[in-house]
Each structure stands twice: as C-alpha cells, then as structure tokens.
Amino acid sequence: MTRDELFHQIQTKRSYLCVGLDADLNRIPKHLLDKADPIFEFNKQIIDATKDLCVGYKPNIAFYEALGAKGWESLQKTLDYIPEEHFTIADAKRGDIGNTSKLYARAFFETMNFDSVTVAPYMGIDSVQPFLEFENKWVILLALTSNKGSNDFQFTKQENDQPLYEKVMRRAMTWGTPENLMFVVGATHPEKFEEIRRISPDNFLLVPGIGAQGGDLEGVSNYGLNDHCGLLVNSSRGIIYAGDGLDFADKARAAAGKVQELMSGLIV
C-alpha cells in the first residue's frame, strides 16, 4: 500500500484507527471455544464489526506463533479475511542481519503479504535494509515505545545531549523515506510528540498505548498530526475485549466508534 492510498482511506473514513488483533484463547468469549478455529472466528467478528471505523489491523504475531502451526493457520486466515483497502501490520519486532533478515522480510511481505512489519533497530542498517527493498511495503521501526522499560535505554543521552531514540530516528531517516518508513512512538509519551515532529515531520507514526495503557489520544493528535495525517493510532484490548459475552462484537464496535468519532473531530 502506498502512502497516498493510506491517506485516502484516512480521509474517507475520517479515522486513523488501527485495531490490534491480539487474540488470546484465555480472553476470547467462551462460546467461541467450541468453534473449529476460535481465534479466527473471534478475529472475523471483530473485523466485521469495525472495518468501516478503522483503516488498519495489527495482529501481534506472538499470540499466533505461541499456538504453533494452528496459530499460523489462524493468522493467515485472518489476514486473508481483512478487506484489501485496510493497512495490515505484522507486529513481529523482527531484526537480524544478512540472509536471516531477508528471509524475515520474505516471510511477511511475500508469503503472508502484510503491508508492513515492525522492526527492531538495535543491529543497525543491515538488519533493516532488506525490509526496505520491497515495493509498496513498509518498515515500522521501534523508536520510543510505550512500555515502562523504554526508560532503560531509549532516553539515554548520546552526543550533543540527544536521547538514543532521537539518534535512532535521525539515522534511520537516511535509510528510508516517508513512503516506506514509519516509527513506533508510544502514546504514553504525549509530551514528546511536538519534539518528534520536529525530528520527523513527514513520516507516519504508529502509536500504541491508547486505551488500556492510558495514552492520551487528543494530546498525541494535537502535536502528531501532519498534512498527510501522519498517525496510525492502535488500540487492542480497549476494543477487542470491550465485551466478553455473546454481544462482544457489538461492544467492540461501540468502543471503536467512540475512538473514530473523536478522531473525526481532530483530523486535519
């Protein structure tokens, strides 16, 4: 998917919501456990309930690979079911060197046909470059994450007193372009978005941490939006687990609708 195609979806739906498909057998409604593929059935109903309110879906790969071959099958069925106009994110946080990185890129971009994959930058350019070689595919590079442990390394001061996450972003912007490179910036750091937009005015930012993690959508949007929207705000648990009964999909739709309504009033 191209940047313009993604922006068109955002404009059409007045939404920059991404729904995280973190399907957990221990949390999905119990009545689905009798289905042949409970994970896919759960995802299918969530997608049907939210597809007109969001522009993307982000399966967290760990929830699927933990189930072995059956989980990978559920993931592929889910990916095939997502409507073509939606942006798809493999939240895999891969990152290795040489042929290993090339094979990770082939797995998610060719075999599974995701639009994007999250990548860890710690090993440098040769761990990221293979993902950037695919046309109309995206690298979403970890920059400033929403977890507590982000304080362990990401704010460590480097030369010129710049934090490590800033150095990562500035260096990575020489590897890719706003047409194929996004950054993960957590919503739990809303005070940093004005500064991040000075560093990276044009790149899309994938923003986790809204909802269950307590991120501030309005604060993030006030400083993070640009002339191509520039934000994909992800909500997982706050939407998909809004209900746990027979009406779970209706509850998910209601939760997604509240986010979309707020986004519609914020979007440029």
Image (cartoon, helix red, strand yellow):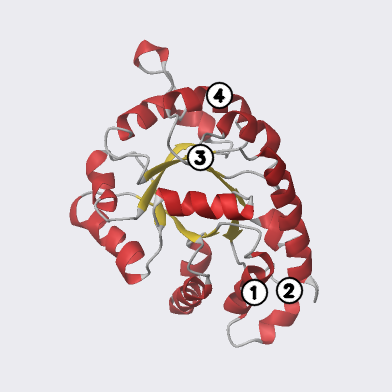
Marks 3 and 2 in Cβ contact (< 8 Å): no
Give residue 64's position: percent from left, percent from top. 50, 68
CA distance separating discs 1 and 3: 30 Å
Between discs 1 and 3, the one toward the N terminus: 1
Residue bearing mark 4? 194
CA distance separating discs 4 and 1: 37 Å
Q: Residue at x 59, y 54 (%)?
A: 12
Mark 3, mark 4: which one is toward the viewer? 3
- Going by the numbered disc 3, the residue's amino acid type is Gly
Residue 184's disc number: none
Q: From where the camera sits, is residue 205 visible?
A: yes
Q: Nearer the viewer, residue 85 or 138?
A: 85
- Going by the numbered disc 2, the residue's amino acid type is Pro
Residue bearing mark 1? 42
Q: Residue at x 62, y 65 (%)?
A: 51
Q: Residue at x 67, y 31 (%)?
A: 219
Q: Nearer the viewer, residue 203 or 131?
A: 203
- Going by the numbered disc 1, the residue's amino acid type is Phe
Q: Quadrant of the C terminus?
A: top right
Between discs 3 and 4, the one toward the N terminus: 4
Q: Nearer the viewer, residue 226 or 131?
A: 226
Which image quadrant is residue 39 in? bottom right
Question: Could you say whether the residue bearing mark 3 is in a helix, strand or loop?
Answer: loop
Residue bearing mark 2? 29
CA distance separating discs 2 and 1: 8 Å
Residue bearing mark 3? 230
Question: Could you say whether the residue bearing mark 2 is in a helix, strand or loop?
Answer: loop
Q: Residue at x 56, y 28 (%)?
A: 193
Between discs 2 and 4, the one toward the N terminus: 2
**Is 52 on the left or on the right of 96, as rendered?**
right
